Amino acid sequence: MTAVEEEPPRALLAGASRRWVRLLPWAVAFVLSVALLPTTIQVLTADYGLNGGLASALAVAQAAPLLLAVVRPLQAWYVIFAADVAGALALLTVDFKEQLLWPFPPMEIVGYVGLCLALGLREPRRTLLLVWLATAGVNVALGFFAPNGTSAMNVLLTILSGVVLVLGGALRERYDAQRRLAEQETISEAERDRRTLLEERARIARELHDVVAHHMSVITVQADTAAYRLERLPPDVQEEFTSIAATSRESLGEMRRLLGVLRNEEANGELVPQPGLTRIGQLVEATARAGVPVEFTPCDADVPEAVGLSAYRIVQEALANVVRHAPSAPTQVSVSVSQPEPEPEPEPMSEPAAECRSEDSARLTVLVVNGPSPQPPAAPLEEGGTGHGLVGMRERVRLVGGTLDAGPLPDGGFRVAAQLPLTEKDFT
């Protein structure tokens, strides 16, 4: 197995979107190298009087690495810095005019400043600080050997290099901050999209079973019992009703599988208030049209929105279970307000809906009781229950801090009883 090769360093500004910006560092480095190489040779030999061979060697060492600085600026700095120091020491061996700059001639300052800009655009703060300290230290040390005495020009390279290093570092950090911000915005947008999707899935999973399953069950029962409720049905009409019932059962199965997929996602969607106590009567009427005799005791109390929605869904699911598992079974639906500790005097057996009111410690009682089915369905409406109905009831009761009691009765019927607190302090 071969070792993974290290990825080669990228050139300066290689991540820019525009091509001319990516080529700009190479163009600047090339121009500096081509311009400084002959200029350095000419100045060192003609103005400073340095030997031609030595001047050429110094010029190559000071100018050629500028091309390397586009990709590896720190390695180029090692070469150019050593060449600049060597050139300053070499100038001590010749007699040059007092007005000429020492220890670093002008062309060396130009090349070094360009190199510092490349360093600032690539290296971290710690490296830039060490580079500037090395530059300042060498400049101070060489000041003690100045042939014509100390001069303010001796610190020119220190000042210019410090300014350019700070400028390049600031540009690099600004670019990095903008890049990280753009990446974070992209990630945040993706996370927001995913969170929205999960919340929507959770909301659909919570409402899908309560709404669609109830109506699909009613359709199936109506289609199955049409032959018993309607006299003298033609054979083709009866066959049509049978086909509708079969299609409804298949749709219920598909919906159950979809509901399982949606509920497997871990997401906490918001509860969207929809129906309330006033809509329970419509549920009872729809169930009665499906052939289930239902007695309904309404309650018009002004209850919190979440409590009203929970009561509606509990009744909806309970009636759907009656239609699915006990068609034509006599059913009683009662919604009333009761106190957790009843007073010693018994309440009247029946109470008008107008007198049903909520008090500080009152609770809403939802009761759905059905007896055994006189005529079990010829075929089950659903193959294998998933239990999402009772789970949904318990989730809604837990949401408002109530209690739920659901279970079969000795005579073969089923009972669902929920106690929902009406005051905010009871929502625990």
Image: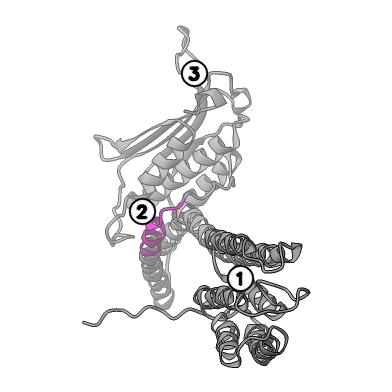
Q: Which residue is mark 1?
A: 121
Q: Earlier in the sequence, mark 1 or mark 2?
A: 1
Sort mark 1 into few (<14), some (14-19) or many (20+) by Cα contacts within 10 Å. Answer: many
Q: Could you say where residue 339 lies in the image, as x and y percent from the top left?
A: 49, 18
Q: Nearer the viewer, residue 192 or 221?
A: 192
Identity, as a three-letter code, of the amino acid under mark 1: Leu
Q: Is residue 86 part of the magenta span, yes or no?
A: no
Distance, label 1 to label 3, CA atoms, is 75 Å
For the record, the magenta segment spans: 256-267
Q: Nearer the viewer, residue 329 or 35?
A: 35
In the picture, the disc for residue 339 is: 3
Residue 229 visible in the shown view: no
Q: Compared to 416, does 10 lie above or below?
A: below
Q: Is residue 266 part of the magenta span, yes or no?
A: yes
In the picture, the disc for residue 189 is: none
In the picture, the disc for residue 324 is: 2
- Residue placed farthest to the left in the image? 1
Q: Quadrant of residue 372?
A: top left
Q: Could you say where residue 138 lies in the image, as x and y percent from the top left?
A: 58, 64
